Amino acid sequence: MGKWSTESLAEHKDKLDPLVAEAQKMNNDQLANEYAILRNKKESVERELSDINLAIRAAEMVFAERFAEDDVKTMKFNNGMSLTISVEQGWQFDDKGAFIKFLEDEGWHHELTVPAGSLNRLMRDLQDKELKPPGVKLGEPFTKFSCRGLK
């Protein structure tokens, strides 16, 4: 059923069941119309979110310059927000098959369902447990911002 795993469906059961019940009341043409409306709305929201993400990235680029100029890692602002910058190590697949086998052998098979973008988080978790999996190599470091006190 698309990208939804059994676990994910179970997790969202309370929200999903009423929606399924409403959809079952519709005939195929009504359901197709509702589906088209929802898909169009999703595309519109994704376009808007993409623009928001670009504006956030632009602000982060300016903050990164200002953090470097002031030689600071954290800034506090009048609105109660604080922003912290850090550099984290990125990772890349060198041999994806070897990495997948490692995860399976070590009992981390549940991690095979996470998005590919989670490789950096997964590698931090593995390093915390002092595990060094094959099939990955160091990638480019990247800048990360943490925000607290956001209202």
Image (cartoon, grey):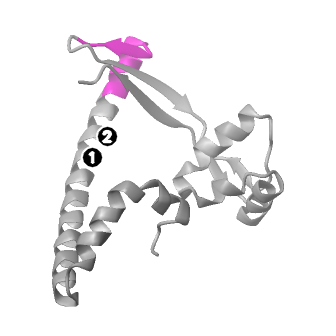
Name the residue rendered at 59%, 42% in the picture: 121
Name the residue rendered at 81%, 51% in the picture: 106
Looking at this view, is 42 or 66 the one in front?
Answer: 42
Q: Find residue 57 and name its label.
A: 2
Range drawn in magenta? 63-77
Residue that numbered label 1 is attached to: 54
Name the residue rendered at 23%, 46% in the picture: 52
Judge whether 87 appears above or below 43 on screen: above
Give the image quarter of residue 147: top left
Say if residue 96 shows up in the picture. yes
Say if residue 93 shows up in the picture. no
Residue 97 spot, x, y in % from top left: 75, 66
Residue 28 spot, x, y in % from top left: 22, 89
Q: Amino acid at mark 2?
A: Arg
Looking at this view, is 14 or 75 the one in front?
Answer: 14
Rounded to the nearest whole Å, what is the CA distance between mark 2 and mark 1? 5 Å
Name the residue rendered at 29%, 29% in the picture: 62
Q: Is residue 72 magenta?
A: yes
Looking at this view, is 147 or 144 the one in front?
Answer: 147
Query: Contact (CB < 8 A) between labels 2 and 1?
Result: yes
Neighbor class of circle 2 (other Cα within 10 Å; few <14, some 14-19, many 20+) is: few
Left or right: residue 135 versus residue 65 is right
**Secondary-structure class at tag 2:** helix
Q: Amino acid at mark 1?
A: Leu
Q: Is residue 129 magenta?
A: no
